[in-house]
Amino acid sequence: MIFDALIIVSYFVIIMVVGIAAAQRHTRTTAEEYFLASRSLRWPSIAISTIATNIHAGHFLGMAGSAYLFGLAQANLEINAIFGILMATFIFVPYYLRARVTTISEFFGARFGPKVGLTYSVLMMVLYAFMYLGSALFWGAWAIDGIFGEFVSFLGDSAPVRLGCMVVILGVFSATYTYLGGLSAVVRTDMVQFALLVVGGLLMLGLAIHELGGWSELYRQTPHKMHLHLPADHKTLPWIALIGMNLLNLNYWGANQIILQRAIAAKSLAHAQIGLLVGGVLKYLMVLIIIVPAIALVGITAANPLTDPDQAYATMVKTLLPSGVRGIILCGLFASLMSTVDSIFNSVSTLWSVDIYKRYIKTDANDMEMVRAAKWAIVGTLLTGVSFAFIQIYIKFDNPEFPLTHWFNELSYTVKNGFVLLIVAATFLLRPSPRLVLTMLVISIPLTMAFKLGFPDMNYFVRAMWIIVGLVLGTAIPTWAKHGWRLEVKLVESSSPAVARFGVALAASLIACHIVFH
């Protein structure tokens, strides 16, 4: 217990020292230095920080629970990210780097006019400053309290009070080093945090496989859990949902400021592309450390199955880990939370300062004023995120049966469907009408809500598929009628033949996974 506590304290000290050191390494007087680390990021930093941002504490609980129920099919949410990563690597990111944008909103603004760029910025800030930050803080606190309650019992006897305290502490901690150091501090701390996340995950993987009896036991004891594709009528993860999932990945990996800020800050196109492709390889590692242990747990608990699948990760921690190791796992949970939260702070502050403050509030703002505005935005983002986390705490304890995760997904996809339209129209259509694009973007929100009301039992990935196809066709058909099928520039761009071969190999590996584990 004492050793575990020392590990946790050491983690917080190391992260804060790394963050402050990054802040003091340079005198950050330029906006580009604060927001984009002077466009100097190399591929290892891009790969690790991008995937660290993608994984948060909710993955360990929610995905492990789903993997316990649905087996390897849950891995689709990880490995199919590779499709979005490949599209971003060879199509979208070259556009962004050629345009030398700081935010993706600038790219959309250049393509479709300032109204579309502003709409994207506002929706992104609302989505991430309020919903994603609040949910990340809530699920991080929920995971820590549920699995390591004895470590945080000093915060109070009441669970809502403990959760509220942890939400504030974790939010303030990550906001502090982001406030001081900008993207450079975020990337440097993410490197440390990803290492902790992987070490903790590999420990869990090794112990779970050992307890099961070896790798071969996965197929002997849980053969029904070793399939990527479930029947088309499966309520949660039907194989047809992969289409909608991949369409949504175009937004998440191709038009998401929080994820792509590192690639935009790359030293060169080569570093951006290699970093993203290595990130794609790391998605396989996430399957190993999150999905596979939960499948192993199915065999381990065969005689006494879990009644609550969401307790899968907690069960592994409590039953498989020896004393002294749990502190490392807890640090991995902290790391997965912090690396997501600090990225949200940095990217939302960038959107506010560049797209709102500089463009509409103070058009003659110098770099120091833009950085100051960004720092105030971090404070505002912290307040909104903590507020949403408090709302979720209230909902969870007022109605424990309320499906928070499903509710959150429904809310976020209400906005994300329109983002897919933006990136598709911006890259695959020749001079689409800005007014038409803006109309479709605005319509996407009530259209998604109407589909939800009209088809409440439809899988939300399938629902997203139909909505996105409708939005894209509604934009593409008038555009094709007016301008034809031509593209303005070369669609696919690679920095070198070696990078192109890397991309082909990664795509082939994804196809092979779907064939082997069908």
Image (spheres, rainbow, N blue to C red):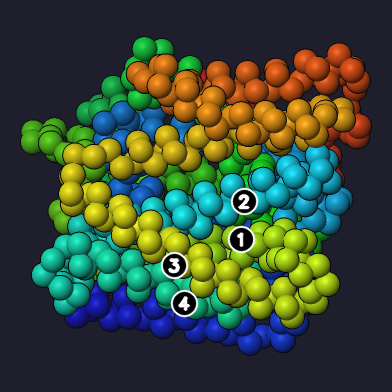
**Residue 85 placement (x, y as % from top left):** 64, 41
Confirm or deny contact between disc 4 and disc 2 (CB under 8 A): no
Answer with mark 4 or mark 2, whichever residue precedes in sequence.
Answer: 4
**Residue 86 placement (x, y as % from top left):** 68, 38
Question: Which residue is labeled 1 in the image?
Answer: 347
User: With 506 as the anchor, is 341 left or right in this view?
Assistant: left
Q: Amino acid at mark 2?
A: Val
Question: Which residue is labeled 2 in the image?
Answer: 122
Question: Which residue is labeled 4 in the image?
Answer: 15
Q: Amino acid at mark 4?
A: Ile
Task: From the image, state whether disc 3 or disc 1 is nearer to you.
Answer: 3
Q: For the point 35% across and 18% down, which residue is it?
A: 457
Q: Quarter-wise, where is residue 352 in the image?
A: bottom right
**Residue 48 placement (x, y as % from top left):** 57, 58
Confirm or deny contact between disc 1 and disc 2 (CB under 8 A): no
Instruction: Name above or below for residue 98 compared with residue 516.
Output: below
Q: For the point 50% across and 34% down, which residue is it?
A: 414
Question: Which residue is labeled 3 in the image?
Answer: 383
Q: Quarter-wise, where is residue 410 in the image?
A: top left
Q: Would you call the spot at circle 3 few (<14 residues within 10 Å), some (14-19), or many (20 or more)? A: some
